[in-house]
Image (cartoon, coloured by chain):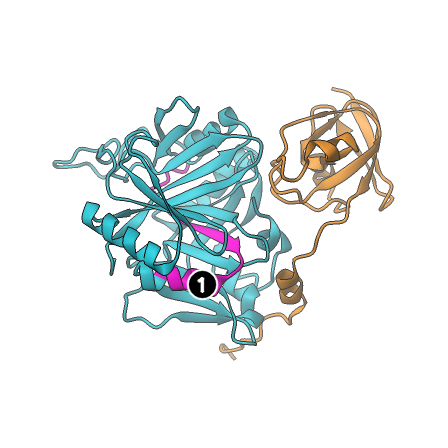
Amino acid sequence: MPAYRVFNRTTGDSFTCDGDQSVLKAMEAVGKKCVPVGCRGGGCGFCKIRVVEGDFECGKMSKAHVPPEALAQGEVLACRIYPQADLTIECVPQPVDAVVEQATRAKQTTTKAMR
Amino acid sequence: MKKGVMRPGHVQIRVLDMKEALEHYTDLMGLIETDRDDQGRVYLKAWTEVDKFSVVLRETDQPGCDFMGFKVLDENTLVSLTQDLKGFGLEVEEIPAEELKGCGRRVRFTVASGHAFELYADKEYTGKWGVTEVNPEAWPRDLSGMKAVRFDHALFYGPNLPEVLDVFTNVLGFHLAEQVMDPDGNRIAQFLTASMKEHDIAFIHSDQPGQLHHTSYYLETWEDVLRAADLISMTDTSIDIGPTRHGLTHGKTIYFFDPSGNRCEVFCGGDYTYPDHKPVTWTADELGKAIFYHDRQLNERFLTVLT
């Protein structure tokens, strides 16, 4: 199975990906975090990227996150694309959930009952 | 059960690929296929459930949950609750018997969080799978994978939690077992039960309506949860978090995703409740510990990945 190079031009990260491996899986395998990791199943939209250059095969993805117009512009889910050539990708900004943002900025737990 | 709602009865889950989904829910999780219909839906149940099915899979181009149904005591209860739902101001859709094969008529309504729920009284009684009704053995011998004991609950994300709480407690007779409160006194999470279980359905606030966080399946022991974690690795299944313990409910749990990205939970243990119990409260500043009792840190994927 040939191995291809994936270059993320938003972050400058580069990693190898086999033709039968998803881009997200290849990224996780080398411990990189340049694309957010969600469900890994084409369902949640978390790992959305734009493929700027290079051919790829595509698995089933949620139409809610990749409607036909998006797909036509090269917007895909990294967990569902398998390179057929070297790829250049870029990150797609994700909408932020206000409740989560506030919660993640809160202090870590303060209970100290065991002292 | 204050108003005759017995238990979670079924959930219809949307999947991108039926073959892959079936491998996940049957081979890996141990649910059993009991039927298919001519819409292409596949019906599954867990071994201890007495009715014909509890999980229905529907193949389409967008994952998530179509609806969740609760079984009520009898036809009279169904009639009476239908009237109460209408009285509350909800639009109610009557779905004829056999729309889901083996299921009696259902009454569907959508709550303010954007989620569709159903009530029904009748479903084909097949008995527990793999054990007899008389002098039963302890467990059936041909279960697969995690050997899920039952479909336990679902967690939904959406807006308008107070209105949803109103319907579930005042109309359907559920009890608020646990909650998460923010510093302004808003309830951002509510765990509702019709039984002694710490939750039969739960909601967390989100601006986007109608989202599924997870469906949950019960296991007996912590060893079973560990074994489930092993199976998740053996099958290269996408893992979310765990095995660990929750602060909320104190259940011992592991979360993972089905091949379409729908999150699943298997868990054991945790607390129980009665209608005279005051709600257990966690505060939003302790949300990390409330969800991940050991890590005590929030995990962004757990909070935001939804289908």
Considering every residue shown, the one lying at the far bottom of the view is A115
Count of marks, rendered view: 1
For the record, the magenta segment spans B146-168
Name the spot of residue A12 as percent of width and height, x first: 87, 44
Question: In this view of the protein, which residue sits in the foreground, B23 or B3?
Answer: B3
Whether residue B198 is visible here, answered yes or no, is: no
Question: In this view of the protein, which residue sits in the foreground, A25 or A113?
Answer: A25
Name the spot of residue A38 as percent of width and height, x first: 63, 45
Residue tagged by mark 1? B163
Quadrant where the image shows the C terminus of chain B: top right
Residue placed at 52% from the left, 71% from the top?
B186
Q: Chain of mark 1?
A: B
Apparent colour of chain A: orange
Apparent colour of chain B: cyan
Q: Tell me: residue B254, above or below residue B230.
A: below
Question: In this view of the protein, which residue sits in the foreground, A73 or B197?
Answer: A73
- Horizontal side of A81 relative to B227 (left or right) equals right
Quadrant where the image shows the N terminus of chain B: bottom left
Q: Tell me: residue A68, above or below residue B106.
A: above
Residue placed at 61% from the left, 35% from the top?
A62
Name the spot of residue A75 as percent of width and height, x first: 76, 36
Secondary structure under the numbered disc 1 in the rendered image: helix
Residue placed at 79% from the left, 37% from the top?
A50
Q: Tell me: residue A78, above or below residue B225.
A: above
Instruction: Please tell me in which quadrant of the rendered image residue B202 appears.
Output: bottom left
Any magenta on residue A88? no
Residue placed at 17% from the left, 37% from the top?
B136
